Amino acid sequence: MLFPVYTNRSDPFALMRSMLRDFDRSFRPLASPSAFPPVNIWQGAEAVAITAELPGVEPADIEITVKEDVLTLSGERKAPEVPEGARWHRNERVFGKFSRAIRLPFAAGEDQIEARFTDGVLRIVVGRPEKDKPRKIEIKAA
Amino acid sequence: MSTAMSRSAEKTPTEAPETTSGGRVYRPLTDIVETDAGVSLMLEMPGVAADDVDITLEDRVLTIHGRTSTTRPEKFELAYAEYGEGDYERAFTMSEEFDPDRIRAEMHNGVLTVTLPRAEAAKPRKIAVKQA
């Protein structure tokens, strides 16, 4: 991290902002994922997409519900079945029930939601309702 | 093992070496179970298809590499991120010899299960010490 000497004296906080930006980049590359499953949220003009990493969860064990603008993702990750007398060398994965609520930028109807699960990654696309879309207003000539 | 997931283990990026493409390489979370028949490993690799996994066993070092293709949806901008996408790699030094031809691997819902059956030759042989 090198901080250049700013020649622009009109903004005394420019250096501080630059330092804070570098600090954020090097120490917090991502929002802190304390909850399971970790989600990424994508925004588009026509829809919002939510992707979540759910390795080891059966698609039948995932439940997605929507109530107005809150999408709830819940389910259970079952522990693998191991034969009796097996010795655990490493146990880094976590199992059990999970639930997460995500607030959407608009109220979505259930029929505008599409969910797909491939290779342990869940992708939900929530379409933006027509009434929420921006309306273009034409300017009439006077 | 609790019934509710109070904490969340997370995959961490590996430090070195860097990739030539500039992408991150993550260390998959792994469970390892040993039975009398052999050892099985369960690695969390979400986003990796069965064809994109490389498993090698050389000099008792088992290396597992998984390639992901980015799931960036078209016409979407990332607004909030809790996880990163990248390849997966992890290597384990096995405590005994395994027959590389008998390793079985299966990918299911983003979890790779690698089963190493114990080799016949690796079963301990007792060597009698003769009295001189």
Image (tube, coloured by chain):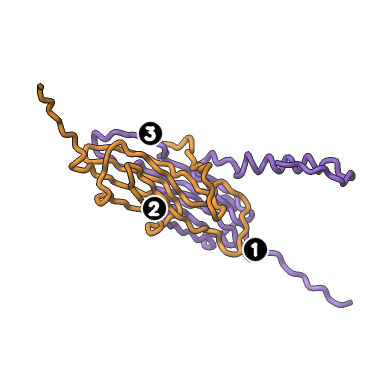
Q: Nearer the observer, disc 1 or disc 2?
A: 2
Classify the position of the C terminus of chain A by image quarter: bottom right
* Picture residue at 79% right of the left edge, 43% below the top: A4
* Picture residue at 64% right of the left edge, 63% below the top: A45
Q: Check the residue under mark 2 and report the chain it is in.
A: B
**Spatial CA span between label 1 and label 2:** 30 Å
Q: Which mark is residue B130?
A: none
Instruction: Please indicate whether residue B14 sits to the left or right of residue B108 in the image.
Output: right
* Picture residue at 39% right of the left edge, 54% below the top: B53
B12 shown above or below B106: above
Instruction: Please indicate whether residue B68 sits to the left or right of residue B117 in the image.
Output: right
**Spatial CA span between label 2 and label 3:** 21 Å
| Chain letter, colour purple | A
Q: Which residue is mark 1?
A: A45
Q: Which mark is residue B109?
A: 2
| Chain letter, colour orange | B
Q: Are marks 3 and 1 in contact (CB under 8 Å)?
A: no
B10 shown above or below B21: above
Q: Secondary structure at mark 1?
A: loop
Q: Secondary structure at mark 3?
A: loop
- Amino acid at pointer 2: Asn
- Amino acid at pointer 3: Met
**Spatial CA span between label 3 and label 1:** 43 Å
Viewer-proximal residue, A54 or A60? A54
Question: For the residue carrying disc 1, how many other residues have a C-alpha within 10 Å: few (<14), some (14-19), or many (20+)?
Answer: few
Q: Which mark is residue B1?
A: 3
Place of residue A83 in the rendered image (x, y in percent of width and height, measured from the top left): 25, 39
Place of residue A132 in the rendered image (x, y in percent of width and height, measured from the top left): 66, 61
Q: Are marks 2 and 3 in contact (CB under 8 Å)?
A: no
